[in-house]
Image (cartoon, rainbow, N blue to C red):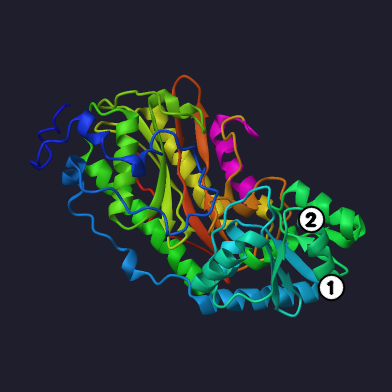
Amino acid sequence: MTPAPSRRPARPGPPSRRELLGLGAGIAVAGTGLCCAASTPMPDTSPAPPAATPADELLAGLLDQSARFAPITVDERAARVRRLGRLLDAARLDALLVEPGTTLSYLTGLEWGLSERLFALVVFADGSTMWICPAFEVERAEREIARVHGPARGIEGWQEDEHAFAPLASALVRRGVQRLALEPRARVFVWTGLAAELGAETLVPGDPIVEELRGVKDEHELALLRGASELTQQALATVAERLPAGWTDREIGALVCRAQERLGLRAPWVLPLVGEDAAVPHGAPTGRELRRGDSILLDTGGSLHGYQSDTTRSWVFDGSPPREFTRAWNTVRDAQRVGFEALRPGARCRDADRAARAVIEAAGYGAGYAALYHRLGHGIGMDGHEAPYLDGGSSARLAPGMTFTAEPGIYRRGEFGLRLEDVVVVTAGGADHFGAWASDPRSPA
């Protein structure tokens, strides 16, 4: 392992690669995560971080900050269920069916696995609820629902020889359901099974309802998203400050994940790319070693009480950035700021994407997707990716409380790739961002 450059303050020697890669299963995602790939819910019931390792010597100043932030309460989730009922009533829908996943967690705090046996929550327009559950799982469901959401009411059990859909349809008919919405991630067999029992004309997509329900974040949600972003940025800055030459991309990624865990984030993920490997936006680490003057791209995030961060920084390690990298970096920074300034209530999502793309085109990097291969950003909340999206084809209107990533990039095959990404929020007067903007192509801080 190459020692840290002499111009830096003396520190204990970095752990060997063997020691670093022994951080444990909790960091096994390092080197295999995809850019912005944290799209599944990240409950705080995930395993605790691994025990201290030699790599923790480099991160000794990072302490768990998660206790500074209050998790979402049972009462807050109950209010979400009531709000969903009002949205259903306004849309003239009788009920929404929700399978296990992020929306179920958003409404109840319950985590339940998906299988061929249907387990689901039904929320009615009057704010009441009903559960559908395999009969042999009812006792466990009652216990788990009570633990996270309060006493379970209205559980409809179904036996293995009858399957779920006839009992569920009968219960819905008894409740007078004539228009049933299915949440966006409901599986096809749920749709076809209910259509066979109730008639296809009874079923409608629940996408607009769920997007309206979850798309606008309240103040508590915004505080968690802001905290998650700030902690991820702190982790990146700390790792960059202590990073010696000679480490591989995977080793760097492992340390970034460990830094976030020490700060209190759960289920961290990372995409670490060095040099020309970063020219593929959703590339993969190759074991490349970091050398003085190499460019590096780190795209990473974690979960704070179930709410996600997603931050990317690109910089040149321990050296002066080449002229073309600096020009591209400044262009990406300007594109990010211009796209951010296009965020305001009433504007369309596509406006921000087009504004950012125009900056890159004006700098001579080509029109359309010539240099910026992907959209400007995506919604973020309990899912790392959620609607709406900042893409050039989206006509969705922005509203205060909507949160997005703003992540333009420039990618030049065989040379370099760079991206800058921050989480932003639409406000009554325009937009705000979480944490600090990137300010220098020589550092992620």
What's the magenta bit mostly, secondary-structure-wise?
helix
Q: Is residue 40 left or right of residue 197?
A: left
Q: Residue furthest front?
A: 161
Count neighbours of disc 1 (C-alpha within 10 A) and say few if under 14, some if 14 to 19, many if 20 or more: few
> Could you tell me if residue 401 is visible in this image?
no
| Picture residue at 13% right of the left edge, 39% below the top | 8
The image shows residue 347, relative to residue 128, as above or below, that is above
Q: Give the x, y percent position of residue 361.
A: 59, 36
Q: Is residue 43 left or right of residue 398?
A: left
Element under label 2? loop
> Could you tell me if residue 308 is visible in this image?
yes
- Identify the amino acid type marked 1: Arg
| Picture residue at 88% right of the left edge, 53% below the top | 196
Query: Observer-nearest residue: 288 or 374?
Result: 288
| Picture residue at 75% right of the left edge, 80% below the top | 126
Q: Which residue is mark 1?
A: 92
Query: Observer-nearest residue: 425 or 90?
Result: 90
Q: Is 357 part of what is drawn in magenta? A: yes
Q: Give the x, y percent position of residue 127.
A: 70, 78
Q: Which residue is mark 2?
A: 162
Q: CA distance from mark 2 to mark 1?
A: 31 Å
Stretch in magenta: 352-369
